[in-house]
Image (spheres, helix red, strand yellow):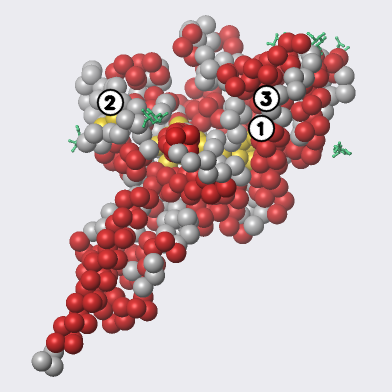
Amino acid sequence: MECSWKTLLLLVCASLVVQYVALRSFRDSLFGIVMVKIHSLVIVAKTFVPGCESRWRPPCDESWAPPPDGAATGSSSSSSSSSASSGRRHILLFAATRSGSSFTGQLLNQHPDVFYVYEPLFHVWQSFTNASSTCCQRRAPERRELLGAYRDLLLSLYTCQLSFLESYIHPQPQDHVTPALFRRSSSLALCSPPVCPEEEGNAGGGGGGESQAGQPEEAWCHKKCPLLNLTLASEACLRRDYVAIKAVRVPTVGDLRTLSEDPRLDLRIVHLVRDPRAILASRMSVFSGFRAWRIWNATGRQPRYVDLAQIGHTCRDMEASAETGLVSRPPWLRGRYMLLRYEDLAWRPEDKARDMYRFLGLRMEPRVLSWIAQNTNVSALSAASEWHYKYSTARDSRATAESWRLRLNFSIVQAVQSLCNSTLALLGYKQVQSVEELRNLSISLVEHRTFQPGL
Ligand SMILES: *[C@@H]1O[C@H](CO)[C@@H](O)[C@H](O)[C@H]1NC(C)=O
Ligand SMILES: *[C@@H]1O[C@H](CO)[C@@H](O)[C@H](O)[C@H]1NC(C)=O
Ligand SMILES: *[C@@H]1O[C@H](CO)[C@@H](O)[C@H](O)[C@H]1NC(C)=O
Ligand SMILES: *[C@@H]1O[C@H](CO)[C@@H](O)[C@H](O)[C@H]1NC(C)=O
Ligand SMILES: *[C@@H]1O[C@H](CO)[C@@H](O)[C@H](O)[C@H]1NC(C)=O
Ligand SMILES: *[C@@H]1O[C@H](CO)[C@@H](O)[C@H](O)[C@H]1NC(C)=O
Ligand SMILES: *[C@@H]1O[C@H](CO)[C@@H](O)[C@H](O)[C@H]1NC(C)=O
C-alpha cells in the first residue's frame, strides 16, 4: 500500500514525459530541428523525474529563434549537437532581388569545398503565399512567422538536414526524392556525383573528378538528373567544409541575429548591394508585375497606380542592413559581416572575389578564376545561348551593371533618387541632375569606397 503513492507519482511523471516527448516531436517535425532519438527519451526521463514541474516549460513558450538544442537537456548536448562545431563554415549571400546575386553566388558555387544552395527560401515563401491566399487574410503575424520559418530552414540547411525542405516542396517529395527543388541546377554540388551520377564512370575518387571538365550547363543537369534524392544531397553536404546559401527574401541583417548567435553555426554574411536604380530597371524587364513602371518608362508620365512602395522598401532595408553592419556594428555581427557592391564586383571581379574569399577564409581556386574569366568578358561569350535569359550570369558583367543608365526614363530615375536619397548616399552612389549626366557613361556614378569587413 505504501508504494502506491510512489507508483502514482511515477505514473504522473511518466505521463508528463510522454506528453513532453510527444509535444517535442510534434514541434520538431514542424520545425525540423532534430529527430527525437531513443536515448533522448532516457535523458529526458532522468532529468525530469526528480522535479517534474520545475523543469516543465511549454514548447509554445519558446520564441521562433532556433531552440538551443543542447541547452534543454544539459549534458547530452555534446553528443547530440550537430556537426557544425566540427569547423564547418556557413555562408549567407544576403541580397535583394535582382541585385546581381546569381552572378555573385556563382563565385561561391564554383568552389569545390562549397555546398551551394540557390534561394531555398523560395519554397517557404511559396507555401506561405499559397496558404494566405486560400485562407484568411492575416497580415501582421504572417511576417513574423515567415521570418521564423526562413531562419529555421536556413539552420536546417546549414546543418545539412535537407529533408527539412520537404514540408515546403510541392508536390510533396516521396521517399525523400523530388523533381521540384527550385533551381536545383544552379548548384554544382546537386548536379555532380554522388548526388547526380556521371554516366561516363569517372573513376569516383571522392570528388576529385567532380565536374572539373567544365561547368555543367544548367539545362544539362535538368536532363541528366531529373530527380533529386535529398538524403543523398544531405550526405554530400556533410562532406563539404562550407555551406553557402543565397537568400533574397530576408529583409534585413537584423533578422539574422538568432542565426548569427547560434552556437551551432559559424556564420559569415556577405551583404550584396546594388544601385537601386539598376535594381528597378532589372525588375522592370524581368517581372510581370511591373507593367505600370514599363508604361511610365515608355510614356515618361507616372501612372497613378504605380507602386512606389516596393523599391522604397528595398532601399530602406538595404540601408538598415548596411547601417547595422558598418555603423552600429553590434557584437553579434562583428567579424561576420561584409558589404559588397555589385558594381565593384562587376568592374574588378577577380579582386573583389579575392576580397570575399579572404573574408570567408576560403582559398582561391583555379576553377573560380577560370569561371570569372569566362563570364566577365563579353568577347568570350559567343556560346551564350537563349535559355540563359532571365537569370543569366554569363555576360559582360561591367556592361550589365551600367546598362540601366541607358534604359530608364529620366523621370523614373528622379523618382527613385528621391525615394532612396539616403540609401544612395550611404552606399556611395551618385545622383544625377540631368539626362546628359545620366546617359554619359564616361561619368561614373559609383564613388570610390572601401568597405572594410568589420572586425
Ligand atoms: C497551392 O495549393 C494548391 C492546392 O493545394 C496546389 O495545387 C498548388 O500547386 C499550390 N501552388 C503553389 C504555388 O504551391
Ligand atoms: C536515396 O539515397 C539514400 C542514401 O544513399 C538511399 O539509401 C535511398 O535508397 C535513396 N532513395 C531512393 C528513393 O533512391
Ligand atoms: C521619357 O519618355 C518620354 C516619352 O517617351 C520622352 O519624351 C522623354 O524624352 C523620355 N526622357 C528620357 C530622359 O528618356
Ligand atoms: C576577353 O577575351 C578575349 C578573347 O577570348 C581576349 O582576347 C581578351 O584579352 C579578354 N579580355 C579580358 C579583359 O580578359
Ligand atoms: C524604357 O524605354 C526605352 C525606350 O524608351 C527602352 O529602350 C528600355 O528598354 C525601357 N526600359 C525598360 C527597363 O523596360
Ligand atoms: C538628400 O540627401 C542629401 C545628402 O544626404 C541631403 O542634402 C538632401 O537634403 C536630401 N534630400 C531629401 C529630399 O531628403
Ligand atoms: C561625357 O562626360 C565627359 C566627362 O565629363 C565629357 O568630357 C564628355 O564631353 C561627355 N560626353 C558627352 C557626349 O556629353
The residue identified by callout 1 is 310
Q: Quadrant where the N terminus lies?
A: bottom left
The residue identified by callout 2 is 227
| Residue 48 place in picture, x, y as percent | 29, 76
Asked whether, in this view, residue 241 is left or right of residue 299, the answer is left
For marks 3 and 1 on the same chain, the one whose residue lies earlier in the sequence: 3
| Quarter where residue 434 is shown | top right
Label 1 CB-ligand 5 distance < 8 A: no
| Quarter where residue 438 is shown | top right
Q: In this view, does 315 lie above or below 305?
A: below
Circle 2 — which element?
loop
Please name the amino acid that badge 1 sits on. Gln
| Residue 389 place in picture, x, y as percent | 52, 14
Please name the amino acid that badge 3 sits on. Leu
For marks 2 and 1 on the same chain, the one whose residue lies earlier in the sequence: 2
Q: Distance between the residues labelled 3 and 1?
A: 10 Å
Q: In which quarter of the image is ligand 2?
A: top left
Mark 3 surroundings: few (<14), some (14-19) or many (≥20) residues within 10 A: many
For marks 2 and 3 on the same chain, the one whose residue lies earlier in the sequence: 2
Asked whether, in this view, residue 4 is left or right of residue 432, the answer is left
- Residue 74 seen anywhere in this rendered image of the structure: yes
Q: How far apart are marks 2 and 3 (CA)?
A: 35 Å
Outermost residue to the bottom:
2
| Quarter where residue 356 is shown | top right
The residue identified by callout 3 is 280
